[in-house]
Image (tube, rainbow, N blue to C red):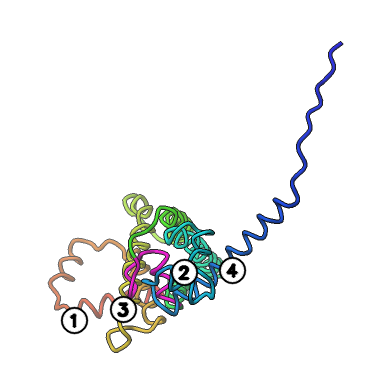
């Protein structure tokens, strides 16, 4: 008669669990302190400067994050996650595809403008005194971020097109629109962040409205008939601008 061998799972080590919880809490505190330091010092802040501003030693940061790349990755995961939550939340609360797109653009610009130095530190983007290139961990977090935002934008675009006449080419090309839109918003947003305050820099609300108009009205035009297209192209530029502005207003 065979007897089953009773297998037991070792009980969790209480000290190990407490240590891991303490370590996670300490990492979170150090990330917050580093974020404040970068906001004040700039994206070029060194580990020594970050540690001094945080009231601790450089060795502590090295112990918890390995090196500056590890700190950038850890901070990037936190910042990007917060940005994603705010953008997606803004889109979900909108009552139309256009207002949803505007809310997403506004949330992105607002969070980036809150601290251009932190944005540059974690993304490597050219916002002001930007840091270097993206680290692999940050790049992965950014990739997930853009994938999730792209999926939300794709849903909004297809919902919009369902209520408008569009041919097969437009329907097929719509799948590429979120990627193009994200690229434009990020590139324009980073250039906007790097532009010194003054007449050449729109306010956040103005920039949001302009980007929304470029993006949304860009997918809203019906393909012109050959005769109409010829007449439009032969008209003076100011006449074409007035016609386009009128059409944009009608679509709103």
Q: In the image as oriented, which residue stretches furthest toward the right?
A: 1
Residue 159 seen in render: no
Give the alpha-carbon distance from disc 2 to disc 1, as whole Å.
Answer: 31 Å
Magenta span of residues: 115-131
Give the residue pinned by disc 3: 246
Q: In the image as oriented, which residue stretches furthest toward the top?
A: 1
Give the alpha-carbon distance from disc 2 to disc 3, as whole Å.
Answer: 25 Å
Within the image, what quadrant is residue 214 found in? bottom left
Mark 2: secondary structure? helix
Q: Which mark is residue 142?
A: none
Mark 3: secondary structure? helix
The residue located at (14%, 75%) in the rendering is: 235
Q: Is residue 127 magenta?
A: yes
Q: Which mark is residue 29?
A: 4
- The image shows residue 162, relative to residue 244, as above or below, that is above
Instruction: Say which label, 4 or 3, has the lower sequence index.
Output: 4
Give the residue pinned by disc 1: 238
Q: Residues within 10 Å of mark 2 (few under 14, many from 20)?
A: many
Instruction: Say which label, 2 or 1, has the lower sequence index.
Output: 2
Q: Nearer the viewer, residue 2 or 52?
A: 52
């Amino acid at each position: 008669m065979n007897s089953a061998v009773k297998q037991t799972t070792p009980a969790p080590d209480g000290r190990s669990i407490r240590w891991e919880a303490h370590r996670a809490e300490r990492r979170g505190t150090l990330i917050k302190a580093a974020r404040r330091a970068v906001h004040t010092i700039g994206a070029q802040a060194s580990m020594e400067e970050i540690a001094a501003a945080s009231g601790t030693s450089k060795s502590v940061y090295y112990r918890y994050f390995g090196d500056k790349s590890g700190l950038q990755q850890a901070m990037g995961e936190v910042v990007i996650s917060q940005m994603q939550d705010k953008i997606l939340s803004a889109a979900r609360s909108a009552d139309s595809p256009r207002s949803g797109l505007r809310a997403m653009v506004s949330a992105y610009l607002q969070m980036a403008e809150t601290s251009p130095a932190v944005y540059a530190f974690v993304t490597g983007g050219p916002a002001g005194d930007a840091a270097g290139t993206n680290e692999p961990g940050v790049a992965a977090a950014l990739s997930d971020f853009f994938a999730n935002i792209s999926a939300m934008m794709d849903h909004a675009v297809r919902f919009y097109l369902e209520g408008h006449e569009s041919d097969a080419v437009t329907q097929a090309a719509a799948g590429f629109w979120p990627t193009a839109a994200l690229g434009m918003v990020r590139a324009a947003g980073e250039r906007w962040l790097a532009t010194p305050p003054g007449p050449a820099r729109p306010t956040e609300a103005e920039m949001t409205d302009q980007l929304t108009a470029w993006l949304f009205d860009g997918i809203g035009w019906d393909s012109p008939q050959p005769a109409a297209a010829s007449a439009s192209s032969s008209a003076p530029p100011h006449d074409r601008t007035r016609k386009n502005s009128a059409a944009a207003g009608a679509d709103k």
